[in-house]
Amino acid sequence: YFPQIEPILKQKGIPDDLKYLMAIESNVDPKAVSAAGAAGFWQFMKETAKGYGLHVDSEVDERYNIEKETVAACKFLKKAFSRYGDWMTGAASYNGGIQNMDRKIEQQGQSCALDLWQVEETDRYMYRILAAKMLFQNPSDFGFGHVTERYPLLKTRKTVTVTESIPDLAAFAREHGITYAQLKRANHWLRDTSLNVPAGKSYKILIPAI
């Protein structure tokens, strides 16, 4: 999944290392959902997702759209960086929240999250990002040896832009030479068996190569 995320981070001016924030948030699982209801690679709560431009309802949940959720995460991180001036504090605010980070900074008279007394989860969060980077870049240093099997990059045969509602996604999949299961694996954001497309709106559906 990194090859799909890295170009977006670069385009949006976000350090490449912050892909490891995504890794610790979701364990790089596109279907990840927390006990609190945060979902997707970047683990957005429903209301937060809507505030960053993601559509979330019973048919469409763009927290599971790898491109759109990564763009939303970039918006948050850029906002945090412009506020705090360093990416580590911005990353910590991704976990603890901007309002909470503001309060800690004001109370303790410090400007960097690394110098703050925080709850253990947020305190550990920044170091977990660094640990993930070390592990992903040098797995042999941690006893993993030669990696022979990796999750393959899901290749896209084509992208279909739909401007009209689809009453039966299984039939739509068959029309494009794939199964409903293959359609869902490529488009986790499709949350139902149909897709309602309001007037003036469109969706891009990935058709995987099989």
Image (spheres, rainbow, N blue to C red):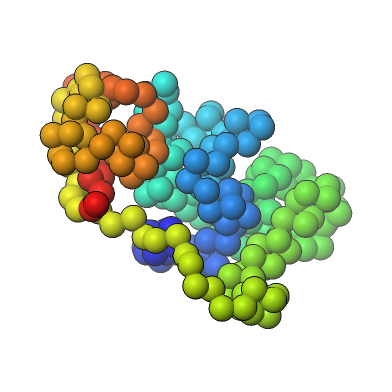
In the image, residue 173 above or below residue 193: below
For the point 56% across and 78% down, the residue is 146
Q: Is residue 8 left or right of residue 91?
A: left
Residue 102 shows up from this direction: no
For the point 25% across and 27% down, the residue is 169
For the point 32% across and 23% down, the residue is 193
Q: Quadrant of the N terminus?
A: bottom left
Quadrant in the rendering for residue 177: top left
Q: Is residue 45 left or right of residue 174?
A: right
**Residue nearer the viewer, 65 or 188:** 188
In the image, residue 118 above or below residue 129: above
In the rendering, at what x and y percent does residue 107 appear?
84, 48
**Residue nearer the viewer, 150 or 127:** 150
Q: How many marks?
A: 0
In the image, residue 9 above or below residue 32: below
Query: Residue most toward the left?
Result: 175
For the point 36% across and 24% down, the residue is 192
In the rendering, at what x and y percent does residue 7 appear?
37, 64
In the rendering, at what x and y percent does residue 68 appear?
38, 45
Quadrant in the rendering for residue 137: bottom right
Query: Residue most toward the front?
Result: 148
Residue 104 shows up from this direction: yes
In the rendering, at what x and y percent does residue 52 appear?
46, 38
Q: Is residue 170 left or right of residue 176?
A: right
